[in-house]
Amino acid sequence: MSRQGKIVWARWSVSLGLAGLLEAACRLGFVPKLQVIPPSEMIAAMVELLQTEEVLDNVVQTFSTVGLAFGSAVVCGFVLGAIFHGLPRVRRAIDPLLASYYSVPIFVFYPLLVALFGLNSMPLIAIGFLAAVPAMLIATLLGLDRVPPVLRRVARMHRLGWGRTAALVILPAALPNLFQGVKLSLAYAFIGVIAGEFILSPGGLGYSIAFAYESFENRTMYGLMLFVLLSAVLVNALLSSWESRLLRRRGRG
């Protein structure tokens, strides 16, 4: 088994072990069911909820919002990062802003976003976008910074044009950092949208979790929370697998 495979198995073993401990603690009464239900009941509740039309509508609403926020953040973050990398003075001016960006809660801008876009899904998309775009922008800057200068010189020696240099030399060299930015952007988009729905939205998975919490419906709350957690982990695992495959192909090339 490869080193990466051993790491994956270790992570799953630890996760399953902790879930087993929580199951035992709940079943034996060490943890009151009014506070936390056993993981097996969370799974059962999740399966039941995913068979209802209301929850499926909320899933579609949340995932479409996350997808729009994530996709736009990745594209804009990459483009802005490439532009700022070529403008050192502008980059020096925005570096303090990027360093302190996450110190200000993005939700404070929600009234302004509602005034601009109205009471629809656009404010939530904007919140997810604003949460995710700096991660991709910073990752792009770091990736372009770490492209070895010798690769650019080799491209000039072979008289490659700007487009071929970017596609064949710069992007492959910056790929590890770019993928880190993509994964972080996905995480921040999820957090921004779910938290926005939890606090501000009249629909979506975040709203359903908040409503279940206020109604003391623990089964519903934990079932939906487990679904959100598993969805985020699955998507992140797919991105990591794709990243590993691309890096192996680049190494063989």
Image (cartoon, rainbow, N blue to C red):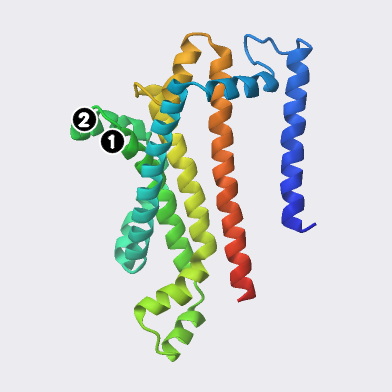
In this rendering, position of residue 76 left or right of residue 213: left
Mark 2 secondary-structure assignment? loop
Name which residue lies at 44% across and 25% down: 206
Cα separation, mark 2 vs mark 1, equals 8 Å
Q: Work out whether residue 71 can be spotted.
A: yes
Mark 2 closeness class: few <14, some 14–19, many ≥20 residues within 10 Å: few
Name which residue lies at 59% across and 71% down: 250
The x and y percentages for residue 196 are 38, 29
The x and y percentages for residue 102 are 41, 41
Mark 1 closeness class: few <14, some 14–19, many ≥20 residues within 10 Å: some
Three-letter amino acid code at the position of disc 2: Gly
The x and y percentages for residue 34 are 62, 8
Three-letter amino acid code at the position of disc 1: Met
Residue sitting nearer the eye, 59 or 22: 59
The x and y percentages for residue 191 are 46, 35
Name which residue lies at 23% across and 30% down: 114
Q: Quadrant of the C terminus?
A: bottom right
Mark 1 secondary-structure assignment? helix
Q: Look at mark 2 in the image and give the residue it sits on.
A: 118
Q: Work out whether residue 100 can be spotted.
A: no
Q: Look at mark 1 in the image and give the residue it sits on.
A: 122
Q: Quadrant of the N terminus?
A: bottom right
Image position of 47 with respect to 8: above or below: above
Task: Give yes or no for contact between labels 2 and 1 (Cβ–Cβ under 8 Å).
Answer: yes
Image position of 17 with respect to 218: above or below: below
Q: Choose top left, top right, bottom left or bottom right for residue 210.
A: top left
